[in-house]
Image (cartoon, rainbow, N blue to C red):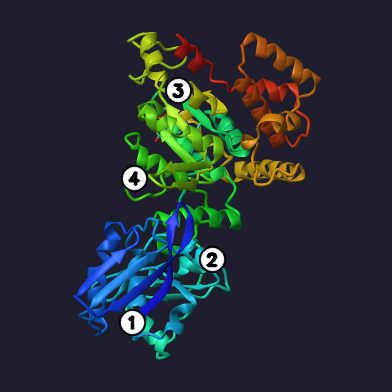
Amino acid sequence: MYGQISTLAFVGIEARPVEVQVRITPGKAAFVIVGLPDKAVAESSERVRNALHAVGLGLPYKHVTVNLAPADLPKEGSQFDLPILLAMMVAMEAVAPDAVAGYAAIGELALDGSIRAVPGALPAAIGANAMGKGLICPAACGSEAAWAGEDVDILAAPHLLSLVNHFKGLQTLARPKAALDSTPSQRPDLADVKGQESARRALEVAAAGGHNLLMIGPPGAGKSMLAARLPSILPPLTPEEMLDVSMVHSLAGELMGGKLATERPFRAPHHSASMAALVGGGTRPRPGEVSLAHLGVLFLDELPEFQPGVLDALRQPLETGETVIARANHRIQYPSRIQLVAAMNPCKCGGGGPGVTCRRGERCAAEYQARISGPLLDRIDLQIEVPAVSAADLILPSPTEGSAEVRARVSRAREVQRARFLKLGAKGMRTNAECAGRMLEDVAQPDADGAALLRQAADALQLSARGFHRTLRVARTLADLDGEEGIGRMHVAEALSYRGETLRQRSAA
Ligand SMILES: Nc1ncnc2c1ncn2[C@@H]1O[C@H](COP(=O)(O)OP(=O)(O)OP(=O)(O)O)[C@@H](O)[C@H]1O
Ligand SMILES: [Mg+2]
């Protein structure tokens, strides 16, 4: 007796086809799963046995072999329960082979036969569609899977019984609806921030060009407050981006109720985060914070408190927009195009800051700041100082301009960039922050005055090649915010002011 059904295994966000084959042969009663199953898959035999029992079927007292092909692809997680059980039911002639032939299946089984949610329904549905099949998945994952396309056949069943009844024509499972998360945004507004004009401006520039931003300042200056308001001035995700972001969140099991979010992700991991938590991986590979922040913001508060090794692991995703995790016999890739925002105090004691010397002297600041490596700093286009907010500013009424106005300017500047990169044929490039090398020099050529200032500054400040390019990139964004094609002296001058002078001098000390 033989039965088979398709399912999928995840390698990064890619869902690879897997065939579940079940053969029941006379002989000693046993239940053997082969084909690189991990612990969760190996344990599925007990869940399958009990779920079968729940629908009134008993496991035959024979030798049952389950093969997960291809044999060399590791199979991880509990999502294989349902396909194993369905292939078994085909082998036991409880379900017709034709009924399941057009589907791939994923789902975890409970002992009472209900089908429990599993991560990754969205990439699985897209993978199944690519195989020319529909998807059988848990009811809780239905609205997520439905995003794969209107023509993809999705069977989202709450219980084995309803699935079997559907196959027998006794009940019809309605196609789940693709749902959007339409709860009104709870995100804090920029209107809460008093004073701090230059920090607000830097935040707007960072949002407009997608630049990474580092804020240095004494405690209570409002750094965390400002960072938390960055998502509120970023343009919403396009439908295509929404799907990209949701693929990663689906794999991490973080899509709330299967609804896709229209807002950009904002992730703020604690500084005690491990390498696996931040960049992904672990015994069962999972996207890390840097991937969960894909197309959104990764906020690292108290930057020097993170483990230096963990911080340096961010260099690759910041450069390539992708995280690669090497496993024993394969590589896993997760998309991670993030905007990094970091905040820190000038020194460990929190004191210091412009014009104030820490009581432990300059060394305190130098040691603290040296915890951040040069190559990581090089990837942060905007480095600004946020001075303590004065009482005079706090007494003032809230500023009239809130996130909505700033967001409109940011969206306009982003549109200009997108159109420019499209014209240049740079597919997939969205913001100035991603622009480098020859293309940067082409699009960010300052006028004669600007070029003269840049040359002067490069000599006087001993700008490195990277520093030079950072200035050009930021100047391009400043001109885009002004709606100007040419980069003038003013743009270059402002770009030079975001260079993080203090940090560099201190770490050199
Ligand atoms: N510019 C400001 N306008 C209004 N309130 C402010 C401002 N700056 C700070 N505050 C108030 O001070 C509190 C502390 O600010 P926040 O946590 O952002 O400081 P921080 O710079 O991150 O400090 P730390 O370095 O200790 O993390 C805020 O919750 C807010 O109530
Ligand atoms: Mg803070």
In the image: residue 117, left or right of residue 335: left
Secondary structure under the numbered disc 1 in the rendered image: loop
Quarter of the image with the N terminus in it: bottom left
**Crowd class of label 3 (few under 14; some 14 to 19; many from 20; radius 10 Å):** some
Pointers 3 and 4 in contact (C-beta within 8 Å): no
Q: Residue furthest front?
A: 27
Instruction: Kindly report which numbered mark, 2 or 1, lies closer to the viewer in this rendering.
Output: 1
**Residue 165 rendering spot, x and y as whole percentages:** 37, 86
Query: Is 378 on the left-hand or right-hand side of 367?
Result: right
In whole angstroms, how far apart are the C-alphas of marks 4 and 1? 39 Å
Does dot 4 land on a helix, a strand or a loop? Answer: loop
Q: Which is nearer the N-term, disc 3 or disc 2?
A: 2
Q: Which residue is mark 1?
A: 1
Dot 3 or dot 4: first in sequence order is 4
| Amino acid, disc 2 | Ala
- Residue beneath label 2, please? 148
Which one is earlier in the sequence, the residue at label 4 or at label 1?
Answer: 1
Left or right of residue 201, residue 492 in this image: right
For discs 2 and 4, the disc positioned in front in the rendered view: 4
Task: Give the number of the mark in front: 4 or 1.
Answer: 1
Q: Which mark is residue 373?
A: 3
CA gap between label 3 and label 2 equals 42 Å
Front residue of 186 and 208? 208
Where, quadrant-wise, is the C terminus in this rendering? top left
Q: Of all residues shown, which one is farthest toward the bottom?
A: 170
Mark closest to the chain's N terminus, 2 or 1: 1
Q: Which mark is residue 447?
A: none
Q: Residue flagged by tag 4: what amino acid is it?
A: Gly
Badge 4 local density, few (<14 within 10 Å), some, or many (20+)?
Answer: some
In percent of the image, x 68 and y 31: which residue is there? 478
Residue at mark 3 to residue at mark 4: CA–CA distance: 25 Å
Name the residue tied to disc 4. Answer: 282
